[in-house]
Amino acid sequence: MNSVKVLDAKGLACPMPIVKTKKAINEIATGEVLEIHTTDKGAKNDLTAWAKSGGHDLLKFEEENGILKFWIKKG
């Protein structure tokens, strides 16, 4: 997955992963992919809902060693 930016939100509690994701998505162009790494278990529901409500596409989600990774394509 080719992401143009990687956001490290590990160790941050809600709502900071969403706040930082919103800021980061504004820094990339439409159609580009933002990769987010977080340890906040609530981020799975939060980021999924946030991407949908913002018109973005959650392309992929995976969990690896307690780190949740998301790839969101800017809509």
Image (cartoon, rainbow, N blue to C red):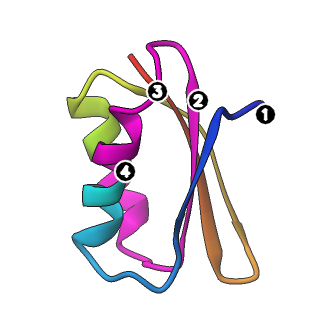
Say the numbered circle drawn on residue 1.
1
Q: Secondary structure at mark 4?
A: helix
Q: Is residue 23 above or below residue 14?
A: above
Earlier residue among tags 3 and 1? 1
Mark with earlier residue (3, 4): 4
The residue at the point 39 percent across, 36 percent down is 25
Magenta region: which residues? Answer: 21-49
Indicate whether residue 33 is drawn in magenta.
yes
Residue at the image point whose x is 38% and y is 25% from the top:
56
Residue 27 position within the rendered picture, expressed as x and y whole percent measured from the top left: 40, 32
In this rendering, which labeled residue sits more in front, label 3 or label 1? Answer: 3
Q: Label 3, label 4: how many angstroms apart (C-alpha)?
A: 11 Å
Q: Badge 3: how crowded within 10 Å, few (<14), some, or many (20+)?
A: some
**Label 4, on which residue?**
21
- Circles 2 and 1: CB atoms closer than 8 Å: yes
In the displayed structure, 60 sits above or below 70; it is: above
Dot 3 falls on a residue whose secondary structure is: loop
- Residue that carries the numbered disc 2 in the rendered image: 33
Compute the Cα span from label 4 to label 2.
12 Å
- Tell me the kind of residue under disc 3: Ile
14 up-or-down from 34: above or below:
below
Residue at the location (52% across, 13% down)? Answer: 31
Side of 26 where 37 appears, left or right: right
Contact? badges 4 and 2 (CB < 8 Å):
no
Give the mark nearer the N terminus: 4 vs 1: 1
Q: Find the distance from the CA under tag 4 to the CA under tag 1.
A: 18 Å
User: Of the residues shown, which amino acid type is indicated by label 1?
Assistant: Met
Question: Marks 2 and 1, how far apart in space?
Answer: 8 Å
Judging by the rendered image, the residue that carries numbered circle 3 is 28
Q: In the image, 27: left or right of 37? A: left
